[in-house]
Image (cartoon, rainbow, N blue to C red):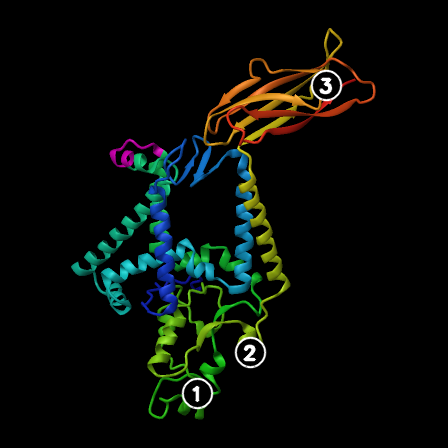
């Protein structure tokens, strides 16, 4: 007979708690849900383009973020944003542990709401445990069914809100409920609905413990100065360990005299933990630093008139009486990198031109000698109008004499907002120089509508025998 190597899951049914960190989590939860669910329906007036504040228009190849319009040519902004997010995660983890998981992660935010729904329908922790272990009565079936239906409703609107970011939200929602929306809208909505229901409702803490890679590699970013949720073992255990209150062990002085710790072994910190661990066993990778155990312990300490802080945010150095070091090379390096990349990204966005000119030289052949003895080079030009208005442009050259520009009928042309044009340009040089085999000149794109739009210049190379 062999041992069963796979442990059956023990459901984690957390108890509710009140306190400063639970209040903070409620505030972040409300703000995050307000942004996520309301932003797709926020209207935003534009001279040209959809009147939606945030819209990711895949078909039109444009992302609208309030007054900013992002084109495919601006894809490096996404790279900058991802670099900032990565460095910020490393920095925050090194300084404050897994606070992102405890307060801002989607898994935490949606699981919190699902637990609230469960509490609303089924009652407090003891009532839910009793209901779970009871036989299948009508009351149990009704409560469990109602809980699942409310979960599905939240999951459905989660998927629908996400889909609304990728099209005109008002028209897309109307088409969705009338059966006229495109198939990807239904597929995306129901896929997000399913994953939300499973992750936040059924899997819960297993996502953080087994599925999320962050819980596994976070340890390499921790050190003895990282802020963690910690149990003060020296105070809580002392020489003779924790013990429940009894006659002669009620007041803190009495427990100190008998060398018992301040922890009264009430188990409240374990009952409120959303991942089901006992923080008194030391730092564990499952801990998401939500600090609900701190609220629970502080509540008990207040009720028995003991000082707070038996469980608190601390570092290993502070727990052992040393001073925490904030300004470490690792933290400074992350902070400098974040500041530098953020500054470069902001500068790139603020200083970007509303007209983009790209020039590529056609190198096969590198040049052509015409029948009249002149030398011709050919170039591919792409001009993009990134402004919010239609623009008329004039194409010319500078820093090149004795040359003619041939782009057919496109010396002057008009582009709509976000529109681009690809041109084949031939440059014919009539006076050959024996000194320079190659020399540089500029293609010039000038707006004919407004003097406020700067003239764009792009350097190109002319080749000759």
Q: Which residue is mark 2?
A: 320
* Disc nearer the start of the sequence (2/1): 1
**For this view, does 207 lie left or right of residue 448?**
left
Query: Could you classify mark 2 by the number of other residues whose Cα lies within 10 Å: few (under 14), some (14-19), or many (20 or more)?
Result: few
Using the image, tell me which numbered label, if any, was put on residue 449.
Answer: none
What range of the chain is rendered magenta? 174-183
Whether residue 137 is visible here, answered yes or no, is: no
- How far apart marks 3 and 2 lie (CA) works out to 78 Å
Foreground mark, 2 or 1, reads 2
Q: Position of residue 286 (x, y in %)?
A: 46, 64
Label 1 sits on a secondary structure element that is loop
Instruction: Give the tally of numbered discs.
Output: 3
Instruction: Kindly indicate whether the residue at mark 3 contacts the one at mark 1 (C-beta within 8 angstroms).
Output: no
Residue 337: where, in percent of width, then height?
60, 53
> Which of 164 and 1 lies nearest the eye of the viewer?
164
Res. 63 image quadrant: top left
């Amino acid at each position: 007979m062999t041992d069963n190597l796979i442990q059956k899951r023990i459901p984690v049914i957390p108890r509710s708690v009140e306190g400063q960190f639970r209040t903070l989590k409620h505030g972040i939860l409300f703000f995050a849900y307000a942004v996520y669910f309301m932003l797709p329906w926020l209207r935003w007036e534009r001279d040209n383009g959809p009147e939606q504040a945030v819209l990711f228009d895949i078909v039109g190849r444009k992302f609208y973020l309030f007054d900013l319009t992002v084109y495919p040519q601006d894809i490096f902004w996404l790279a900058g944003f991802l670099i900032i997010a990565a460095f910020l995660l490393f920095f925050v983890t090194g300084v404050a542990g897994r606070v992102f998981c405890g307060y801002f992660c989607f898994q935490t935010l949606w699981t919190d709401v699902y637990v609230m729904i469960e509490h609303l329908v089924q009652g407090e922790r003891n009532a839910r445990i009793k209901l779970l272990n009871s036989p299948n009565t009508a009351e149990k079936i009704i409560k469990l069914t109602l809980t699942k239906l409310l979960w599905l409703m939240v999951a459905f609107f989660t998927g629908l809100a996400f889909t609304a970011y990728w099209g005109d939200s008002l028209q897309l929602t109307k088409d969705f409920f009338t059966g006229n929306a495109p198939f990807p809208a239904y597929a995306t909505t129901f896929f997000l609905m399913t994953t939300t229901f499973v992750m936040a409702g059924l899997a819960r803490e297993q996502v953080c413990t087994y599925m999320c890679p962050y819980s596994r590699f976070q340890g390499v970013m921790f050190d003895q100065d990282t802020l963690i949720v910690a149990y003060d073992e020296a105070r809580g255990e002392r020489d003779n360990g924790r013990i429940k209150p009894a006659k002669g062990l009620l007041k803190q002085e009495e427990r100190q005299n008998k060398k018992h710790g301040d922890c009264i072994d009430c188990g409240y910190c374990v009952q409120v933990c959303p991942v089901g661990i006992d923080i008194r066993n030391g730092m564990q990778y499952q801990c998401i630093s939500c600090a609900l155990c701190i609220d629970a312990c502080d509540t008990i300490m207040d009720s028995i008139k003991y000082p707070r802080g038996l469980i608190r945010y601390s570092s290993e150095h502070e727990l052992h009486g040393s001073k925490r070091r904030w300004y470490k090379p690792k933290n400074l390096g992350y902070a400098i990198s974040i500041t530098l990349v953020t500054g470069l990204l902001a500068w790139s966005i603020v200083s970007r031109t509303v007209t983009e000119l790209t020039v590529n030289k056609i190198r096969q052949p590198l040049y052509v000698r015409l029948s009249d003895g002149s030398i011709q080079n050919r170039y591919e030009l792409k001009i993009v109008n990134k402004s919010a208005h239609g623009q008329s442009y004039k194409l010319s050259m500078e820093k090149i004499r004795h040359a003619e520009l041939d782009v057919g009928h496109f010396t002057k042309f008009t582009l709509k907002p976000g529109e681009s044009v690809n041109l084949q340009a031939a440059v014919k040089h009539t006076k050959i120089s024996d000194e320079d085999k190659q020399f540089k000149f500029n293609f010039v794109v000038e707006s004919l509508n407004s003097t406020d739009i700067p003239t764009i210049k792009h350097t190109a190379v002319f080749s000759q025998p």
